[in-house]
Amino acid sequence: MKKIIISILILILAVFTIFQTNTYASSLSLSTSKSEVKVGDTISVTVSFGQKVAAADVTLSFDSSKFAYKSVSKGTANSTGSSIVVSYFDSTGGSNPTSSITFTFTAISTGSGKFSAKCSSAADSNVNTVTISGSPSKTVTVKKEESTSSTNTKKDTTTNTSKNNTSTKNNTAKNTTKTETPTEEVKSNNANLSSINIEGFSLTPEFNKDTTKYYLSVNQDVNSLNISATSEDESSKFEISGNENLQFGINTVKIKSTAEDGTVKEYEIEVNKEDTTLGLSYLLISLNGQNIDFSPEFDKNTLNYTLDVENASALDIEALANYEDAYIIITGNENLKNGENVITINVQKDEEVKTYTLTVNNTVENESLFEQITSFARNTWLILIVSICALLQSSIAIYYATMSYKNSNSSK
């Protein structure tokens, strides 16, 4: 009885262990769209995982003397001559896994060529590691087009008969002409780059062979970029332009990739070279609430400006430095005179100073003749009134003096 109980416990433990251990294992399988093709034909090779995966690294080996790689249905491919290494991941985060990847090849020469695949790593939608063993090889035969032939057979028979002697002569001539169609080399149309690297910088967004526009910011000290790139197909070539003599603002760097058959693909990098020198980032001049135009247009690195105003006694100036800890000193914008005036704007940070100069041409209009006459009349009346008041004051003083004199004489 005791032995039976122990046996039951061992069985339960084994079953429990089986159900508690997640087994994620399968084997790759290969299938081809054709088992026999002719030179120049396209053939598809599908690698199946045996289950759905959200990420995988697959290597497909092939006979490069019989087939030329063209494309892959999923993932990022890197050709290493006789094998294609594909890194695949589900960009949706596991909601759209795949069960297979299809490669496309072109048959380039006659004979039999093999395909085989292996998976170095894989994971399912729940980020569980999946172990997938390699596939058996698959053989595809490449034949050339059937040749045309013509056969001419000529048979001459001469029979000589005598009484006791019969002679038969057969002459047969056979000529065969065989025409072979020369094999035309199939050129690759793959102009993809597999990488772009810039020394000391990172591209935005991250490199992808199907993304052709990138962005990069550099500081004012960077005058050139050291760029290296890698072609996805060994037979393609590329050239880089625009990465030297960078100017302030937007610069465009181009990488032109040309496939073996002449197909062109162009990658572009927009490089923003920022000007970080001390200066003004904003300048506004106004008179009585109205903005005043000045020339040339404001630019941080332009230090001299000219503007014309009328009847201005002072100008309002708003200026902003491109550094928060810099301070600004404005002089000469008040008590403007008729004619030329000079206003200076000093921007200072630590020991560094940058000075902007505004030359202000101020025109003060003269009073009209009517205004001059009116002013003269007002002044004349004022003088007359003052004079009359002065006379009145004098007359009153004389009257009081006279009356005082009479009173003093009468008292005597």
Image: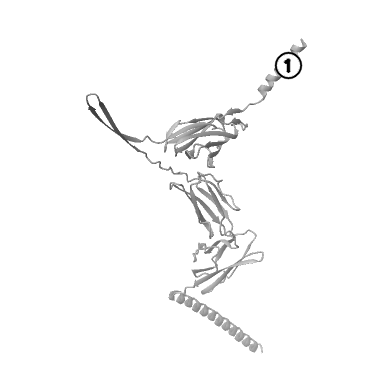
| Location of the C terminus (image quadrant) | bottom right
Where residue 237 sits: x, y (%)? 49, 50
Where residue 131 sits: x, y (%)? 61, 30
Q: Which colour scheme is used?
A: one colour
Give the class, few, some or many, for how many residues have Cα within 10 Å of label 1's Cα (few <14, many ≥20): few
> Which residue type carries mark 1?
Leu
Seen in the picture, residue 45 relative to 369 is either above or below; the reply is above
Q: As rendered, which of 154 and 35 lies closer to the eye?
A: 154
Residue at position x 57%, y 28% in the image: 27
* Residue 58, quarter of the rendered image: top right
Residue at position x 54%, y 55% in the image: 272
Badge count? 1
Seen in the picture, residue 260 relative to 132 is either above or below; the reply is below
Q: In the orientation shown, which residue stands out farthest toward the top?
A: 1
In the displayed structure image, the side of residue 79 where residue 178 appears, left or right: left
Where residue 114 sits: x, y (%)? 51, 34
Residue at position x 61%, y 85% in the image: 403
User: Which residue matches tag 1?
Assistant: 9
| Location of the N terminus (image quadrant) | top right
Where residue 282 sits: x, y (%)? 56, 60
